[in-house]
Each structure stands twice: as structure tokens, then as C-alpha cells.
Amino acid sequence: MPAGARPALLADEPQSTARAGHFSNAQIAALFAILVAIASIPVLLYPWPPLGDYINHLARMHVIATVRSDPDLARFYQVDWQVIPNLMMDLIVPVLQRVMNVYLAGQTYTIMCFVVILSGTMALNRQLYGRWSVLPLIAFPLLYNSVFLVGTMNYLFGIGLSLWALAAWAALRERAMPLRLAISTLFVLALFFCHLFSVGVYALDCNEVDPSDQGLYSAQVSFGSRYANLADAYKAWGADSAKWAIAQTDGKANVLSFENSEYNILKFYQQGFDAQIKTCSGCKLTVVKPGQDFANFVWSMLFVGRTSDPAPEQNRFTSPACKCWRS
């Protein structure tokens, strides 16, 4: 064997490996488009997807888009814009509804959520590793998760946007602080209108600096002397809501409480609410469990829309955890 043969072979091995495992930017873009199209198929096949809170969001979008031109809706609804979270869908879908029906606008927004999440994942990976890669596309099957099935559409968009915010933060880490703060402020403002949890996702990462550096935040959230932790705070909130319901019905609240074991904050809230309602001797509490008491659940849906409520408006009110009415 010639002396130079072996080194030549070794020199060729990295190139062969690169050719075998390397995807060009065009190929990655094509794979991205194909996977987004596949993920969109279930959304496009049915205009009313079985997502828990989605139909409530879609109904609100229709009201916002048409209340000025629909006198029947105007009798019962008035749009009152405020600076609060959970508005991203409200800002986008009614605009889309100007050129399409509300169902297609909702489908378009849902696909936008998919695109923002997947592209944000790829952009963050690009900033961390210095090149585009197909590996972040493994997030594609995870788009259909329990959070998506709940239908928290503003939160979903916010998670995708927070990934883009993190990618921008990583890209600008060596740039001047005023520029970083300006870009970060714009992202925080947009994330605020998506969901407060998406702001938290972004803020948590921004606090992850070099171990030898001081964190960007100097203190943790305090719940005061009344609450030992977040669970106690939500239980107290639930109890306070129940006290309000009892007071509004003169101690005769008839309550449907929908059990939620998936999200801890809602579970703690409900524990506090239900415990307080049970202290009211004249109140009635019906706990609707997931998949059970279906007849009660369907009947309670009659009270979701104001126009379908058979009870007089003065005898009806809502609380964050339940639908309540006077007997």
C-alpha cells in the first residue's frame, strides 16, 4: 500500500459523512413546508376542530368582526378594548375575517401557530449551533399535544413567538445593551398580548446567564404573608370567588363546577372554590368530571351564550370557575 493511501482515505471520510448526513438549506426549507402541510391536514379537514376552548374563541372573533354591522349582536355585545393579555387572536382573526369566513380565518390562525412554533424552534437552534439543521423538525409531531387540544390559542401563538424572542436574544448577546433591550421590549410587548405564561417562558431564559455572572433578576415573586406558595394563592382566589357567588345569590347559589385535573393552577382554584361553596348550607354544588355527567354538561352549555340563556339577565351571572344562577 502506498504511504499516502491511508491518509487520503481518512481525509475522504469526513466528506462522505458530511454528504450522507448534510441537508442543504433548500432541502430543509422543503421539509419544513411538507411537515407544516401534513400538520395542517387535520385542521383543514374540519372547520370546527374538537379543541376544548376553540369554539369560544371563534365565537368571540365573529362578534368582534361583525358586531358593528349586525344589530342583533349589537343588542347583547359591545367591544371594549383594554390593555390585557390574551388578545393576539382577537387582533389577527377579525382582520382575516374581512376576506374570508370565520371558520377559515380560525383555521388560518391555527396553522399560523404551527408555523410560528416550528420556525421559532428552528431559528433558536440556528442561533445556538450556527447552522440550519433538520433536527428541530422532530418537534413536528409534538404540535398535537394536550395544550393544543384544550384550545388555548393565544398561548400557543405566544409559545412560538417566545421561541423567536429567545432566538433574537441569543443572536444579539454580543451586541450593545440598548439594542438588546429595545428588541427584547418589543418582544415582551407582543408576548404580553399573547399570554402571560409566554412572557414567563421568555423571561426565564433571559435570566439564564453565564454562571459566573449575576442574574438579571434579583428577587423571586412573593405571595405575601397570607400565602405560603402559589397553590395557596390560587386556593384563596377560588374561595374568594365562591364567597362572591354566595353573596350574589343570597346564599342560594346553584353551581356547576367543571373538574380540571390537567392544570395545577385550575385544580388549586377549584379546590378552594368547591370547599368554600360546601360551607354554604343553602347552596348546591354539582361537580362535572371529564367524560362524566354528560347530560349536565350539555345542559350547562345552554348558559354559555347570552342569547340562548332562558333566564332573565338580572338573575344570571358568571364567575371564573362556574356558571351560576338564582333558583
Image (spheres, rainbow, N blue to C red):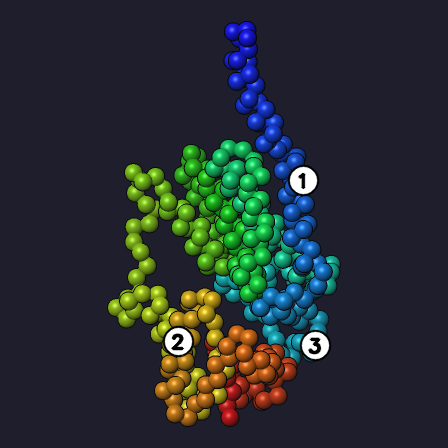
Name the one closer to the observer, 1 or 162. Answer: 1
Q: Give the alpha-carbon distance from disc 2 to disc 1, as whole Å.
A: 49 Å
Q: Is residue 203 left or right of residue 302?
A: left
Q: Amino acid at mark 1?
A: Ala
Ranked by sequence position, the earlier of labels 3 and 2 is 3
Relative to 99, residue 214 above or below = above
- Could you say where residue 198 lies in the image, as x and y percent from the top left? 47, 55
Ranked by sequence position, the earlier of labels 1 and 3 is 1
Q: Amino acid at mark 2?
A: Gln
Q: Secondary structure at mark 2?
A: helix
Relative to 207, residue 55 above or below = below
Residue indicated by mark 3: 71
Viewer can see residue 190: no
Relative to 134, residue 163 above or below = below
For residue 246, what is the image quadrant? bottom left
Q: How many marks?
A: 3
Ranked by sequence position, the earlier of labels 2 and 1 is 1
Q: Amino acid at mark 3?
A: Pro
Q: Secondary structure at mark 3?
A: helix
For disc 3, the neighbor class at 10 Å (few under 14, some 14 to 19, many from 20) is few
Residue indicated by mark 1: 30
Q: Tell me the residue at 56%/83% (across/down).
A: 296
For disc 2, the neighbor class at 10 Å (few under 14, some 14 to 19, many from 20) is some
For residue 74, what is the image quadrant? bottom right
Q: Secondary structure at mark 1?
A: helix
Q: Tell me the residue at 65%/49% (across/down).
A: 36
Dots 2, 1 in contact, CB < 8 A: no
For residue 96, what is the image quadrant? bottom right
